Amino acid sequence: MERIGTVTEPTAPLGEPVTMQASEADRLIISAREGMRRFAAQVYSSHRFVAPDSDAAGDAERSGSDIVPVSMVDGFVAAIVDHLQAWVDKTGGHDGDPQLWLSLYSDYTLFRPILESLAAAIWILGPDDSRERIKNATKLLATEHEQANRYIQRINRVGHPDPFAEQVNTGLDRIIGEVCERMGFNSTQIRRPVDPSSLPDKASRFVPGSGSKFYRLWALCSAHAHAQLFTVMRAGARTSGTGPYGDWTYVEADSESFAELVRFTGDTLSVLAGLLNRRGHMLNSEVGPRPGADA
């Protein structure tokens, strides 16, 4: 297994592909990538539904809404699968192709929304109390509504209104109000936006052994997504030397560091899968993704 694009010591001139034998971390990433590819393929090829008499069906009936929390969970799962598939494709994950190409920024960047969506879905599904599940989902819906409202206000100020965004956000506002009234939630408290950086900690109590790791890895992914150079350099594999133009430092993706993220993501995906099954979110691969349609 060769052509691994991660290094501890560069074996090719700067700017050229690096060839080296796969390390244990590389093999872990490649193995996990195959599992993630299968997970994404299973979800893509299946019709998702809520089992009758399940927790999820009871939550929808209790909240009076198909959106809270069922469709919200579906949305987070879709985001996870979409970004997993993008990462699998990006790193060379095609049938019969064992090579692995890691980039300094983009791999961590793709995992940021995966971790955020995992945290959000687990925070909704984790509690055994139905009321708490509905409350958490409503808070996240209210956060999306508030963020969309800021967007609408800003583009209206510069004379470029988005009528469809306004229509959707009006609908979200109505749903939030109806759920709060039906459940007896304090609407003012529910509508306080949830800080995205708090979600990993909120979800970690449902992820055995997570501790602060969920937040730490999410923060690392966020730093890459925001092009925070010095954090990226700190997390990368660094090699220094002296050349004709002076001293240089060669920084590229560190497979050992990234392997920790991949392993944690795989473990957390297993937690999510268990919660989806427990709450009654099911897949039917025989029906297909959209009954009566090709895909």
Image (cartoon, grey):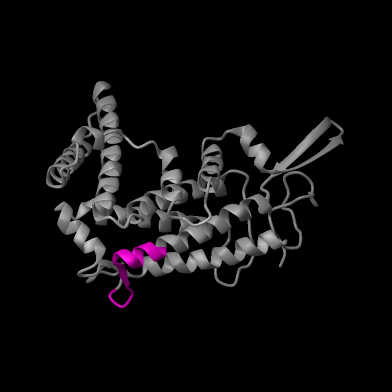
- Residue 93: horizontal and vertical position, in percent? 56, 64
Residue at position x 61%, y 64% in the image:
30
Furthest-bottom residue in this view: 286
In front of the other: 239 or 202: 202
Q: Is residue 221 something that shows in the picture?
A: yes
Q: Between 146 and 11, which is closer to the camera in this rendering?
A: 146
Image side of residue 56 versus residue 205, left or right: left
Extreme residue in the front direction: 129
Q: Is residue 129 above or below residue 181?
A: below
Q: Quadrant of the C terminus?
A: bottom left
Judge by depth and name the residue closer to the eye, 103 or 208.
208
Q: Residue at x 79, y 46 (%)?
A: 13
Q: Residue at x 62, y 51 (%)?
A: 258
Which residue is painted at 19% across and 57% down in the image?
Answer: 60
Number of numbered tags placed on the structure image: 0
Is 3 left, or right, of 224 in this rendering? right
Q: Is residue 93 above or below residue 159?
A: below
Taking the image as drawn, is residue 289 in sight?
no
Residue 101 sits inside the magenta stretch:
no
Q: Quadrant of residue 231?
A: top right
In the figure, is residue 152 to the left or right of 19? left
The magenta-colored residue range is 273-287
Q: Which quarter of the rendering shows the N terminus?
A: bottom right
x, y percentage for residue 162? 23, 34
Q: Position of residue 140 (x, y in %)?
A: 30, 43
In which quadrant of the rendered view does residue 78 lie? bottom left
Q: Is 284 included in the stretch rendered in magenta? A: yes
